[in-house]
Amino acid sequence: MPIVLACLQERAPGERRVALTPETARKFAALGATVRIEPGAGAEAGFPDADYAGVEVQEREALLAAADLLLCVQSPAGADLARLKPGAMLVGLLAPHRADGREALLAERRATAFAMEKLPRTTRAQAMDVLSSQAGMAGYKAVLLAAQLSPRFFPMLSTAAGTIRPSKLLVVGAGVAGLQAIATARRLGAQVEGFDVRPETREQIESLGGRFLDLGVSAAGSGGYARELSAEERALQQQRLAEHLKGIDVVVCTAAVPGRPAPRIITAAMVAGMKPGSVVVDMAAETGGNCELTRPGENLRHGGVTVAGPLDLASSGALHASEMYARNLLNFVGLFLKDGVLAPDWNDELLAGTCWQRPG
């Protein structure tokens, strides 16, 4: 009998994305799965129930009881996990670092949980990398937010009232989100710099038309992430960055490491030294912020500088973010869904590395 693959409506505050789109629902059906969704699962992302042709719409409690494989964006609440079908599989952004009792609930249901944050960063895994696909949307939206908050034009303009100089924008962190932010700011006409303690990012920043800001500190680490700076390196970095920020109009902060607090890079003193009317958009607000003044979900003013701590940036572009995320999950689940049967190969490094909870 084919397995039942299900998708719930997300209930986390501010979450508009969906883990299953009409496109991926058709492809999962072609892999032999029976596909079901909760009413309204994709509505907030722009996918009404009617778009899911051939997909059964079923109420939440019945879905949880029937699903052999449950797809989600964020982890379902504990009450939902407690109602999972025994032996079910769960795939999504499950925040495995949170100590909130979900492991025990999953163990009670003998569930297998794949936390997509844990996916090994290999070439083979690129088509499944949800962190990268969602960071791209977040970086794009962060720059649009910065442009909205800034009292300045981004591009240079020659007008009858004189010439407007382009805004100077600095992107802190040159991961996927940072590179998308650089590309977006360049399209809007700003003068763009990128800063990262990993020297290998210079070529990537410059390839997008940005200038690499070299503060004389290198902290290349493993797995594509930066290592932690020493006290001396951090002091030197902050001294030089503080001086540079005095001439910057907009800062977009993107430095984050999954499962860990965001590195603190911009101090209150640095913000105080910036020009009135300057803007800081801190994409790392959800994990503590790269800026000392950041308050998650709020915009505040400090000495004439606006500091924004937006949440759910990827969700604000829910349609395209959902399309990318759903394709990532399709590619990942395709590793172990064959002819309507769930058959994970635990010798596969991608499955083994992503697995957070497993019976036995």
Image (cartoon, grey):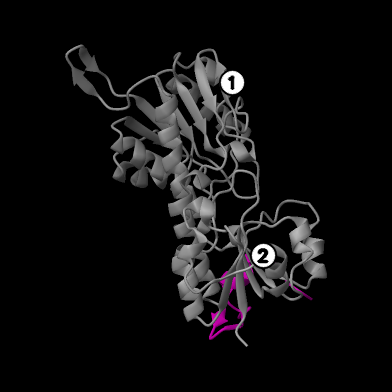
Task: Please tell me whether mark 2 sits on a helix, a strand or a loop.
Answer: loop
- Residue 203 as seen in the image, left or right of residue 121: left
Residue at the spot 73% in from the left edge and 71% down from the top edge: 65
Q: Give the numbered dot on residue 59.
A: 2
In the rendering, at what x and y percent does residue 295 appear? Answer: 63, 29
Look at the image and give the residue range highlighted in magenta: 336-360
Residue at the spot 62% in from the left edge and 80% down from the top edge: 3
Q: Nearer the viewer, residue 339 or 46?
A: 46
| Residue 180 part of the magenta-drawn span | no
Q: Residue furthest left?
A: 160
Task: Please tell me whether mark 1 sits on a helix, a strand or a loop.
Answer: helix
In the rendering, at what x and y percent does residue 336 appear? Answer: 57, 78
Find the distance from the CA under tag 2 to the CA under tag 1.
Answer: 49 Å
Amino acid of disc 2: Glu
Q: Nearer the viewer, residue 302 or 63?
A: 63
Q: Give the numbered dot on residue 268.
A: 1
